């Protein structure tokens, strides 16, 4: 239990009402402040278009076709990158975990890959692959690979001794241990690696698109800014934020459901 | 008091399975640095060989030897020195502001359930989404100098700090809190003597993630917007096909990042070895 | 199929040197017999059980089952029940029970059938599809027993199986399981540090000395099985308990 104050355990209804009120207030304050800033001339209308203009642009976009085409491109990149990173990561993690010596040797390398600032290499990726979807996918796979491989290898190398003892007592063969025991025991770590990898893939695909692309949602944002359609860029950013938010939410639910413990 | 039998008496048969399992288990936990080093060397050597054989164009990925030479060259370059200084300056300021904002916001949300319930989802959303989506706006608001780097660093840093501070406050043992209150401790004393120490691990974790993210924020902004700092230099070298310079700089930064990370983990482990067990504080 | 232990000694290396766990242990368990092994902490009784089941190799002496030497675990002859249940949390209860049979290469259908039978034997049929974490400690231990029974072994080797449970559960579980196992004519070797458990379960109690464990004595318990919990209030029970107590009491222990 937390030491926080404010919520009344005796009147949860009141708390919920207060929460709702606070949220509404926040939205009103932000919207009003925004409108005041742009209409009142505190910020140039170029860099801060009024909220209603942005809203109109958003509705136009939603009705049009280019938004959805771009979404498709981005979604495709995300899915392909995640599947590739997941497969490569899990297979690599599995293979590396087979031998204790190799696992011990490779663990620091994978851990370094995990923290390596791959963002710095992105301009190189653009130089190497041009600005098409392949570069985003390649880049995202490299980023997502490391946490997945690291966690998979870690999970498979550190099986609880009790389960291995059990396998020995019931005379399991090596394949049986792999299939019945290791996969099950390592599953939480593997899933957690996939979660992190998924997050990284998402971040890097968006990063790639926003900063050097020729298709996709990020590219649309970039284009909008370059052609000074600022309100449109705001709308697109809002859309992409909501989209990634929804993806995150779906991901969390999926990963939570796959846990067994 | 245990019986001792002389080890390895001539006729004794092979050691028991338990002992063997214990020994190999212990070996598996420790890292195998020599082998790691060997693998790394093999990778680097492989890179050099592949390029020299002409399998990959040298202009695209350079060679380890050239990268090392570039490193030497760059360290003497005043432009590089200035970029490093600019980056560190931006890092310092963005961390300072971001941490301060994060601490205040984190404390407020941590201590007040209603506010937390109302606004935490937004914070969590901001934490999860790729904040690079906002970068195009940063050019508009902050130009291309050192400011967008600082601003983006502040954004990334503060969010991390907020989340960790809330977690830290959450982990304060309610038992200590209620006991102190029962003894009539004032709000200020409650804060300084119960909440702050209890939340300290979370706060420190927050500051650590904060500074890492401030660094990422600064460098990523430089990478794509600014025309100052190491990020800018990497972009410059990369797009001008000065691959060896770009890689030298990237590996240098990566090495610093990794080294600092390892040092931090080591410190953290040392600190938690001395940490009191949960119930002992009061 | 008698379980025969002859002149067993077990030594294992620790960081301080070699440790003699047991010395010169000879023991014979007859089919269908319940034998309990008791002794002070550290007397090597758990190590002894592991050697009996082939999980560890003795330094000297031998174990054989029906004349065949025991060199590695064979759950179809002697199956283990461990103190920490070791149920696999990612499998359902029934999948846990059939685990050993699957490892032995038995067909899925037969394995499932046998597992269901044994689960019924321990009275947990309705939990076949549940996950271990949904069960109480006592129920999980019963599943572990079912898993061992599924191998239809000559002997169950139980390593302080009720150690992690509270007193009440121990008693009722002990009585319940004792009855069920007696009904099937199962042979059991049970390690415990509870005097009551040792007496209640046993046809014969083997008392070990402090480390290095040697057989101090064997006590026969004449009362026929299955026994009700009332047996614990009888004078015979009290008498044996007093005898055990004096043998195991620290101040009277044989130490180095």
Image: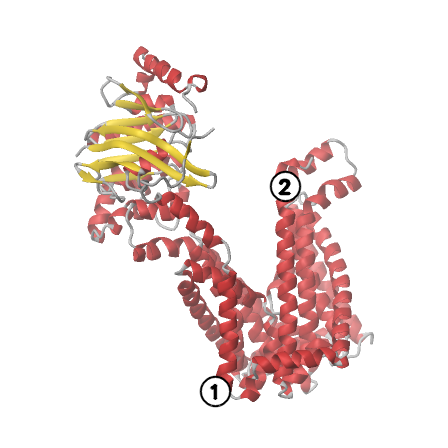
Residue under pointer 2: A9
In the rendered view, tell whether residue A19 sits above or below residue C82: below
Please tell me how many numbered marks the rendered image carries.
2
User: Going by the image, does B168 lie left or right of B29?
Assistant: right
Q: Residue at position x 21%, y 40% from top?
A: C69
Q: CA distance from mark 1 to mark 2?
A: 73 Å
| Residue C95 drawn at (x, y percent) | 30, 48
Image quarter (top left, top right, bottom left or bottom right) of the N terminus of chain A: top right
| Residue C139 drawn at (x, y percent) | 36, 36
Neighbour class for label 1 at 10 Å: few (<14), some, many (≥20)? Answer: few
Label 1 secondary element: loop
| Residue B150 drawn at (x, y percent) | 75, 70
Residue under pointer 1: B53
Residue B34 or C2: which is nearer the viewer?
B34
Q: Which residue of the protein is positioned furthest toward the front in this rendering?
A: B10
Residue A145 or C13: which is nearer the viewer?
C13
């Amino acid at each position: 239990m937390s030491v926080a104050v404010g919520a009344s355990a005796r009147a949860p209804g009141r708390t919920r009402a207060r929460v709702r009120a606070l949220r509404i207030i926040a939205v009103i304050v932000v919207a009003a402040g925004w409108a005041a800033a742009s209409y009142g001339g505190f910020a140039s209308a170029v860099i801060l278009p009024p909220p209603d203009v942005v809203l109109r642009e958003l509705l136009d976009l939603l009705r049009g076709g280019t938004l959805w085409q771009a979404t498709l491109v981005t979604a495709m990149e995300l899915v392909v990158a995640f599947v590739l990173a997941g497969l490569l990561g899990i297979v690599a993690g599995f293979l590396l975990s087979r031998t204790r010596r190799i696992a011990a040797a490779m663990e620091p390398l994978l851990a370094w890959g995990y923290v390596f600032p791959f963002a710095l290499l992105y301009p190189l990726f653009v130089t190497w692959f041009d600005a098409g979807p392949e570069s985003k996918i390649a880049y995202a796979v490299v980023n997502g690979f490391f946490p997945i491989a690291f966690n998979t290898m870690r999970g498979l190398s550190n099986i609880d001794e009790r389960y291995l003892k059990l396998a020995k007592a019931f005379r399991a063969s090596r394949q049986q241990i792999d299939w019945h025991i290791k996969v099950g025991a390592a599953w939480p770590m593997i899933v957690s690696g996939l979660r992190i990898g998924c997050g990284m893939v998402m971040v890097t695909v968006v990063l790639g698109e926003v900063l050097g692309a020729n298709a996709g949602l990020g590219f649309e944002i970039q284009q909008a800014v370059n052609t000074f359609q600022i309100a449109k860029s705001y709308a697109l950013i809002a859309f992409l934020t909501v989209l990634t938010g929804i993806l995150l939410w779906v991901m969390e639910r999926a990963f939570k459901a796959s846990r067994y413990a | 008091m245990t019986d001792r039998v002389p080890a390895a008496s001539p006729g004794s048969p092979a050691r028991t399975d338990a002992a063997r399992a214990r020994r190999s288990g212990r070996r598996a936990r420790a890292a195998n640095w020599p082998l790691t080093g060997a693998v790394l060397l093999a990778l680097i050597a492989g890179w050099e060989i592949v390029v020299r054989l002409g399998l990959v164009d040298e202009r695209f990925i350079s060679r380890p030897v050239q990268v090392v030479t570039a490193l030497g060259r760059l360290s003497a370059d005043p432009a590089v020195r200035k970029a490093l200084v600019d980056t560190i300056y931006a890092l310092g300021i963005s961390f300072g502001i971001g941490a301060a904002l994060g601490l205040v916001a984190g404390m407020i949300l941590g201590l007040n359930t209603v506010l937390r319930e109302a606004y935490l989802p937004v914070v969590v959303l901001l934490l999860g989404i790729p904040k690079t989506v906002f970068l195009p706006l940063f050019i508009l608001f902050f130009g291309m100098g050192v400011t967008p780097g600082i601003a983006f660093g502040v954004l990334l840093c503060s969010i991390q700090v907020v989340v960790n501070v809330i977690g830290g406050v959450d982990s304060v043992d309610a038992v200590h809190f209620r006991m102190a209150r029962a003894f009539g401790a004032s709000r200020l004393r409650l804060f300084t003597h119960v909440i702050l120490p209890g939340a300290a691990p979370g706060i420190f974790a927050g500051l650590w993630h904060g500074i890492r993210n401030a660094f990422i924020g600064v460098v990523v902004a430089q990478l794509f917007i600014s025309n100052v700092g190491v990020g800018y230099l990497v972009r410059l070298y990369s797009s001008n096909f000065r691959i060896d310079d770009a890689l030298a700089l990237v590996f240098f930064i990566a090495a610093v990042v990794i080294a600092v990370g390892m040092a931090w983990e080591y410190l953290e482990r040392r600190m938690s070895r001395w940490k009191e067990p949960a119930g002992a504080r009061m | 199929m008698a379980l025969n232990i002859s002149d067993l000694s077990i030594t294992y290396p620790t960081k301080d040197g070699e440790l003699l766990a047991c010395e010169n242990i000879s023991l014979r368990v007859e089919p269908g017999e319940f034998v309990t092994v008791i002794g002070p902490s550290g007397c090597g009784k758990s190590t002894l059980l592991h050697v009996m089941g082939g999980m560890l190799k003795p330094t000297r002496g031998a174990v054989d089952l029906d004349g065949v030497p025991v060199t590695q675990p064979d759950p179809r002859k002697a199956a283990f029940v461990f103190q920490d249940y070791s149920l696999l949390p990612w499998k359902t209860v029934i999948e846990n029970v059939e685990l050993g049979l699957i490892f032995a290469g038995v067909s899925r259908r037969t394995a499932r059938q046998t597992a269901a039978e044994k689960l019924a034997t321990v009275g947990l049929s309705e939990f076949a599809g549940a996950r271990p974490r949904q069960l109480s400690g006592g129920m999980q231990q019963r599943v572990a027993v079912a898993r061992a029974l599924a191998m239809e072994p000559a002997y169950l080797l139980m390593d302080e199986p009720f150690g992690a449970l509270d007193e009440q559960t121990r008693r009722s579980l002990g009585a319940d399981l004792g009855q069920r196992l007696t009904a099937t004519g199962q042979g059991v070797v049970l390690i415990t540090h509870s005097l009551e458990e040792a007496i209640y379960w046993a046809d014969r109690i083997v008392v070990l000395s402090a480390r290095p464990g040697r057989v101090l004595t064997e006590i026969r318990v004449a009362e026929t099985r299955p026994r009700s919990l009332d047996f614990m209030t009888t004078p015979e029970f009290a008498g044996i308990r007093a005898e055990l107590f004096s043998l195991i009491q620290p101040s009277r222990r044989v130490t180095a």
